Amino acid sequence: MFKRWNRNRKLFVLFTIICAGALVSVLFHFKYLYTALIFLQSIKIRPVQISSGKYLKTNGHHNFGTNNWRSYYPEVAEYLSNIEKGNIQWPIAVLETTSPKFSFVEIIPPPKNTTYKVGDVLQAIIHAKNGYDIAKTYGSDYFHVRLIGIGRDGKPNGDALSPEVKDHGNGSYTIVAPLLWKGKTRLTVELVHSSEAIATLINSTSGFVGPGIIFYGTYSKGDAKECNVGLEIRDQANPPCNFSRPKLGITWYCYRPKNKKCTDLEWIGLREVEEESIKLGKRPLFTTNVTWKVSIKGSGSTFGVSATDFLNKMLHYQPPCNHLSGVREEANETRFGKISGMYMDGRWVSFQCQNIETKYLVRASKCLQNKIIYIIGDSTLRQWYMLLAKVLEFKREHGDGRIWQRPRHGRKAASNVTVHYFGHGSPLHGAGPPLSRPYVVDTLSTIHPRGTGKGVYIVLNLALHFCLVDTVVYIRRLTAIRRSVRNLLKRRPDVVVIIRGCIRHKNSKIAVPSEWFSFQLCKILRGIFSELPNVGFIDTWSMTSAHPPWDMHPSNPAVEEHFALFMSYICPIA
């Protein structure tokens, strides 16, 4: 009896020691466990079907999806690679991420020791630090930098530009900004996302079913079933209906209806599920004015710039606008860095060519005479069509108001101007029948102008609706579109094709949680089309980065600036 009690006592003591050790270990690593728990709450492991017929598990602990996009964004590619190799820990506690409280920007040399004049180049360095005031040793933070003119009243006067920010990959960033107006000038630097937050965004969207958005397709018998670019296999005997066209870069699946037959869809809709969304603005890495979209120390530095005739001379020697200027980011590169223009008194001034002012939009009827314009893209390009409908006074169209992406066609007989608008194919965050969302390659295949195609202009853009799924979906789609554009230009070499860039925006929605996705996709867009000659580019990212308001759907004056730049490629300077 005594021996048994003694043996039990020893086991009890041993058990107590093990528990105590475990408790100490938990307390010691609490901050990492807490971070991990927060992280695990936000992810789901979900097998998906892709066009090759293979299956993937998405949103794993260190799963950042496919990596073929990384060559277009080498700074982030290096950061993700280091995480995957175990050289950098992620996720980490919020205090260990880049902190706007301790990160700072310094102008080199300090303005108080320098006299600036128009034509000089301002240089500044951003030093990233974490919440413990310790310097970061890796890059990939996302900053928004602007140089703005300040009037006598102390308010912005309409002069602005957004300079290049060079990431050195070691926690420091260089700003190179041309000084192109006289008077007071202010440098502003805002931390939009820490590198750790960017890794979280990539991880959260590394699958084929975007968080917070559920598409559904309605079959002819009235059954409405979930659809997407990839779906979980729930029943091996009855896999999802496959509406994909892999050779055209299109993947689209829908669960089978009750009768198990994969008939054509009559309607594609969607609904938002907030509890499954990324929820920026509430999570620790995405708290407004704390860890998300916050000015860093040193932002707001103001200095004077004296007048010279540098800008007048520079603009005097600008070439006419030519669509062959190219899509590559390097096409904009000068001694000022990769910057395509600036706002002066609220008007966009291109550094690429002599662009016309928006006041000449009243002459659009004459400029576009005998022209056919195809506008193909999302709702931000639909704004172009609506602008032309107003300027050219098209006859009002009647249609289903629920279907914003429906094709639209306008004509002004007096000037022989025809304008077509088409949305792009799924994924598209708009309800309607499949015919309301034709795939871009299908739209391009219907364009058969006479002769060499002279007088035909095509403007393309798609990006925003691809934010929530793995970037391979976007790359496949763009690759197919590039091939289609190349074939069109072979058939009709005088057709002018122009890619419109992406839009910088501050607002966040379930479908487009962060502007960083637009930034990432714009790099991919430019990279893919840079390989195609004879295609032009309108750098709306630089335009919308430099000047507010920052909305997903730019204001009417901003849209007028974008279209005026497009008109500059068609009409000579008035």
Image (cartoon, rainbow, N blue to C red):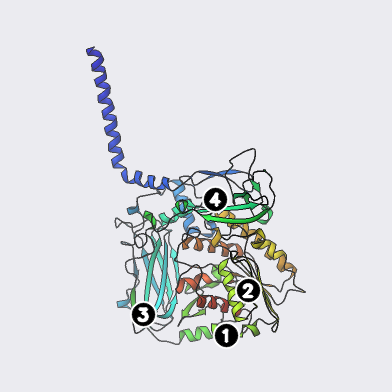
Name the residue at the top extreme: 1
Residue at mark 3 to residue at mark 1: CA–CA distance = 28 Å
N-terminal of the two: label 1 or label 2? 2
* Amino acid at circle 3: Lys
What residue is pinned by disc 2? 324
- Label count reads 4
The percent position of residue 479, horizontal first and vertical second, equals: 63, 59
Residue at mark 1 to residue at mark 2: CA–CA distance = 23 Å
Name the residue at the front extreme: 222
What residue is pinned by disc 1? 360
The percent position of residue 285, horizontal first and vertical second, equals: 38, 55
Residue at mark 3 to residue at mark 4: CA–CA distance = 45 Å
Instruction: Say what secondary structure mark 1 lies in.
Output: helix
Instruction: Say what secondary structure mark 4 lies in.
Output: loop
Foreground residue among 495 and 84: 495
Mark 1 vs mark 2, foreground winner is: 1
The percent position of residue 569, horizontal first and vertical second, equals: 62, 78
N-terminal of the two: label 3 or label 4? 3
275 relative to 387 in the view: left or right: left
Q: Residue at x 61, y 56 (%)?
A: 268
Q: Which mark is residue 290?
A: none
Whether residue 338 appears in this view of the structure is no
- In the figure, residue 476 lies in which quadrant? bottom right
What residue is pinned by disc 4? 209
State if disc 4 and disc 1 touch (CB < 8 Å): no
Mark 3 vs mark 4, foreground winner is: 4
481 relative to 278 in the view: left or right: right
